[in-house]
Image (cartoon, rainbow, N blue to C red):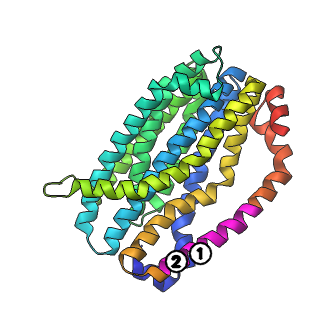
Amino acid sequence: MDTRTMLDQGLGRSLFHMTWPMIFGVLALMSYHLVDAFWIARLGVEPLAALGFTVPIQQSFTGFQVGLGIAVTAIISRTLGAGDALLARRQGGVVAILGAVSAGALCLLLWVVRGPLLTVLGAGPEIRPVIDEFWSVWLGAAWLGAVMYMGYSLHRAQGDTRFPGLMMMVGSVLNMLLDPLFIFTFGWGLPGAAWATIAAFTIACMVTYPRLWHRQWIAFDLQGFAIWRTIRQVSSIGAPAMVSQLLPPVSAMLATGLVAGFGASAVAAWGLGTRLEFFSLVVVLALTMSMPPMVGRLVGSGELAAARRLIRLAALFVLAWQLGVSLVWLLTSGLVVPLVSADDSVGNVLRA
């Protein structure tokens, strides 16, 4: 969506058209996380507790890729707003490589420091082998998820939110369908959930990146291109965004460490509760995906006043929406708990 279209049809209407596909996409992602927890809960308390210890790390990884995605969409959309499509394609090539390499480095770091990290989180020695077995596969799924998300960010930077929203739904449905097959039919247990994610994300990447190339939204012809300038731009915008995105996971890690003192059932319930909490943030997360390309286009074309109006509009909407969501969870909490956990000890802690 270009600047003129946004201004002609109104900022509120444009924001709606850009955001609604992402709402369904984010909702699908949250659903597959919840379905993962549903199937894993059938394996027993220890696998579910292992998943609970993974949740804050997963949130941190999500914060990393969301912060990087915000930077990518902001930079490329600003370039497009200034009318330089060739530069935008080259920037897309740089950030695709940068995202894959940095996500891989983060996965490697998490594997190396998993021992001290799990100690901080309060994981006891009896559950460490379960977590190690799961993380050896889950980190590969996390890397693929970051690469996939980068492809979606490059689409959003071009003003296309429908394709990422659709692919997020397709990938999530595939994951949900493969979960029982990999976990139970193949007998892979907890790691089977991560293998299902790897399979779904691989298919999504095989569709996403050829589409970027076919539409000429990404280029690797970088001769004479100021690569380090783009990396500095990504860092200057992405670093603050990542910090803001990482604060909730850090608090979640500290909280998980405190909860771990109450036993495996408490950690399992905490992990499920956190996953349910994700649903409260669906619309907010969708806005974080749809707004940066809009603001970038407006800033790139010199429409600073319109960019400020758009931000104010979104902030007021989020305040009203989150108040409504909180009331809904409060009224329906008694109905939700039996659906996500069959274990009485976990359900009792979750209801409390």
User: Gap in Å between the C-alphas at discs 2 and 1?
Assistant: 6 Å
Badge 1 is on which residue? 312
The amino acid pointed to by label 1 is Arg
Task: Name the spot of residue 234 as percent of width and height, x first.
Answer: 36, 56
Residue 270 visible (yes or no): yes
* Residue stretch in magenta: 306-323
Residue 309: in magenta span: yes
Q: Residue at x 68, y 33 (%)?
A: 256
The amino acid pointed to by label 2 is Arg
- Label 2 neighbourhood size at 10 Å, few (<14), some (14-19), many (20+)? few
Badge 1 marks a residue whose secondary structure is helix
Disc 2 + disc 1, Cβ < 8 Å: yes
Q: Residue at x 54, y 51 (%)?
A: 245
The tally of labels here is 2
Q: Is residue 13 above or below residue 8?
A: above
Badge 2 is on which residue? 308
| Residue nearer the viewer, 173 or 270 | 270
Task: Name the spot of residue 261 as percent of width and height, x first.
Answer: 74, 25
